[in-house]
Amino acid sequence: MTLKTMVRSVPGLLLAAIVALAIGLRVRQAAGSMVYDEMASMYFSGQSWGNLWGWWMLRETNPPLFYSLLKLWRMVVPSPGEWAIRLLPLMIGFAHLAVFGHYVRRRLGWPAALLGLLLFALSPADIYQSAYVRGYVLAKLMVLVSFIGLVRAIEADGDRKAARSGWAAYVLAAVVAIYCHTTMVLWPVIVTIAVLVDEGLSRRLRMGLALRLIGADLGIMVLSGWVIVIALAQLHARSANIAWLVPLNWIDYQSSLNLQLLTGGAFSALLMAGLMLIGLIRRFRSRIVRLAALISLLTVVLFKLADQVHPIISDYTMHWCANFTVLLAAASLTGGVIGEDPARRFLRQVSALSVLGGVALAGLVDLFVVDYMVVPQDWRATVHTVADHPGAALLVSHESIGVVIEQTCLVEFGSEHCPFPLVVMSDPRQTDNWAFGGYHGRLVRPEDVRAALGKASTIYAFSRYYYTPLQHLGLDPGDWNEVMWDDGELIGPIPATAFDPPGPGEPPRKADYNAQYTGQIDDDDDSADDGDGGD
């Protein structure tokens, strides 16, 4: 193999290494237990088409498109196991990487494409969402397709076929994104402002383009009418499912932006921010780079403004914009030109390899040394722990937790009927009303819990959010072993006698319905386990 051939093979080898890294990190993430919202996706995908696309969905803040795709997917896969279910978002996530890499390579060259793919491969938010059984990963892909289509339409230069296909891709992909998540109604607004500002800055604002763009946006809004009507009805009804969201302060907002738009870590995020600045300066003449910068800025501003009016920001709702922050960073690496001086080419290639190596090192350090990718809940460990303990029962509070446990048993054991007694306490809170009427068993009043536990000799209890069954009965979870995750804990084993009424001379138990699981371990609680075993 000649030196020239070896040099030409480097991009292919690097691409293979980045793809292998992306696959490995996502498979590692997918091996973990499905979490609360994913089990909710399972529940919704089991509903009838009439429920999914009717007024019944007023209970759910996410539109039904992804649930419908999951429903169809479950008709295809042989079993409802975690790997079979998670294959759907994984395939969508890899399709996104393929589309992004191909587009950036065509517009900005191989070095930029490799850097962009590496940044996505190492992004904790992207790793998480690529294996997350929710609609965010499809929304991100559709935003990218919509953007590519819009740029194609803008640059058609009289090519009617290219213009028509570009406008069609822009409109249809935007509509799909909106039917994945309601906050995506801001996408046409953001990209329209970005295009008009870019046209104005270039001193060549074309009225025909502006009118066609506004017309396309009106088409998007009409086609998204179902989502808009349902969202307005939910706002009017003050849905309890979004009551937990609160406007983020600036520190929390900065942290969320770091996670979703950068790489989430300390070292790699700073490096990516620097590359974004270099990319903007180096490639400012490129339309897609200017638009990426404007879209990123407008997203940060408009989402914050919208969040002040009505909270919409979580650690998932803005990652679609990483399409543009990553594109900006990728633009920092330039490709070769015909007739390039060999010495200059060598320095450019060494520089590109150094940047790729530095990004890879910083990203891996953030992932495996800082390692902040926490486990929200481990439902798999929960149901298997109870099932593996003869004579054990599981106690939970609130109907939504009962629905999630049933879905977990479906995934783990092939049936919604768990292989152990499940006691679900009624809860006065109206939060998570998406699950109301969904639990197949009987909701038990707190005073009837002891009788409902029946002949079970050992009890496990699961706590999440305000759904803390032991505190609702006046018991202290710190009295028993606690396996704690970021957003849930399994308590037990607890002897069934602990649920007997207080004996003579014992103080009465005081129920605490405001007790909330926060994921924090008390300093004096030696029984707590940080849950690493469920990772």
Image (cartoon, rainbow, N blue to C red):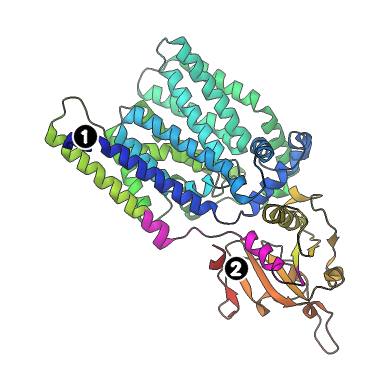
Q: Quadrant of the C terminus?
A: bottom right
Q: Residue 253, position in %: x, y?
A: 49, 51
Q: Residue 263, position in %: x, y?
A: 41, 49
Asked if the stretch drawn in magenta spans residue 291, the answer is: no
Callouts 2 and 1 close, C-beta under 8 Å:
no
Q: Tell me which corner region of the image, top left, top right, bottom left or bottom right, holds residue 74.
A: top right
Looking at the rendered structure, the kind of residue marked 2 is: Met
Question: Which residue extends farthest bottom?
Answer: 505
Q: Residue sitting at 58 percent across and 46 percent down?
A: 86
Circle 2 residues within 10 Å: few <14, some 14–19, many ≥20: many
Q: Which mark is residue 484?
A: 2
- 169 horizontally vs 238: left or right: left
Q: Residue sitting at 60 percent across and 40 percent down?
A: 135
Mark 2: which secondary structure?
strand
Q: Residue sitting at 76 percent across and 50 percent down?
A: 435
Which tag, 2 or 1, sits closer to the chain's start?
A: 1
Q: Tell me which corner region of the image, top left, top right, bottom left or bottom right, holds residue 331.
A: top left
Q: Is residue 167 above or below residue 15?
A: above
Q: Residue 373, position in %: x, y?
A: 49, 58
Q: Quadrant of the N terminus?
A: top left
> Closest to the observer: 81 or 60?
81
Which residue is tagged 1? 5
Q: Is residue 332 in view from this perspective?
A: no
Q: Tell me which corner region of the image, top left, top right, bottom left or bottom right, holds residue 492.
A: bottom right
> Closest to the observer: 509 or 83?
83
- 111 horizontally vs 87: left or right: left
Q: Residue 37, position in %: x, y?
A: 64, 50
Question: Which residue extends farthest front?
Answer: 1
Q: Is residue 390 in view from this perspective?
A: yes
Q: Nearer the viewer, mark 2 or mark 1?
A: 1
- Read off the magenta span: 364-393
